[in-house]
Image (cartoon, rainbow, N blue to C red):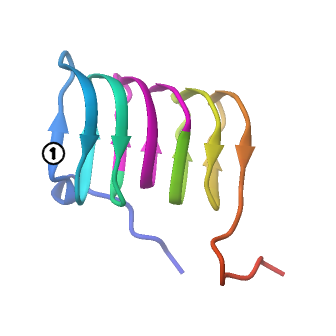
Amino acid sequence: MARKELSDDDIAAFLGKGTSFKGVITYNGSIRIDGKVEGEIISQGALIVGESAVIEADISVGTIVCAGKISGNVQASGKVHLQSTASLSGSINTPDLIIDQGVAFNGQCEMKKPAGKKERE
């Protein structure tokens, strides 16, 4: 079964390259970050971290696709996809993890399936 990837049409908010934000970001839907964020990011939606993004935050989201730099702990109820240009320093907690060749990952990873879902046999 093919999974639907996020497109630019699905993005509700955008923090562009050259912009910065300090504080707590909460949102519904999907956002894309290409700038700098310090603080915390919380949502059940999707987070797209662009190649130029620098995030120093604890992140708790549904799904994350990262091509930029993250320093902090990442928790995703769905999927974490680290693309080849990504750099992540911190722990990851997710049931589904994809790490492309070339990723710099320094930290720990815990992968537990949500209650009620069986492991692959």
Q: Is residue 39 visible?
A: yes
Q: Residue 68 colored magenta?
A: yes
Per the rendered image, the range of residues in magenta is 47-73
Residue at 21 percent across and 52 percent down: it is 8
Residue 5 as seen in the image, left or right of residue 34? right
Please determine whether, in this image, residue 29 is positioned above or below residue 56: below
Q: Is residue 12 above or below residue 88?
A: below
Total numbered labels placed on residues in the image: 1
- Which residue occupies 33% across, 59% down? 45
Q: Position of residue 61 (x, y in %)?
A: 42, 52
Which quadrant, please, contains the C terminus? bottom right
Q: Residue at x 67, y 81 (%)?
A: 117
Mark 1 surroundings within 10 Å by alpha-carbon count, few (fewer than 14), some (14 through 19), many (20 or more): few
Q: Which residue is mark 1?
A: 13
Q: Residue 32 lies in what quarter of the image?
A: top left
| Element at label 1 | strand
Residue 67 can be seen in this image: no
Of the 4 image quadrants, the one containing the N terminus is bottom right
Q: Report x, y in % for residue 56.
A: 43, 22
Considering depth in this image, is 40 or 120 the residue closer to the camera? 40
| Farthest residue, direction top | 18
User: Mark 1 belongs to which amino acid?
Assistant: Ala
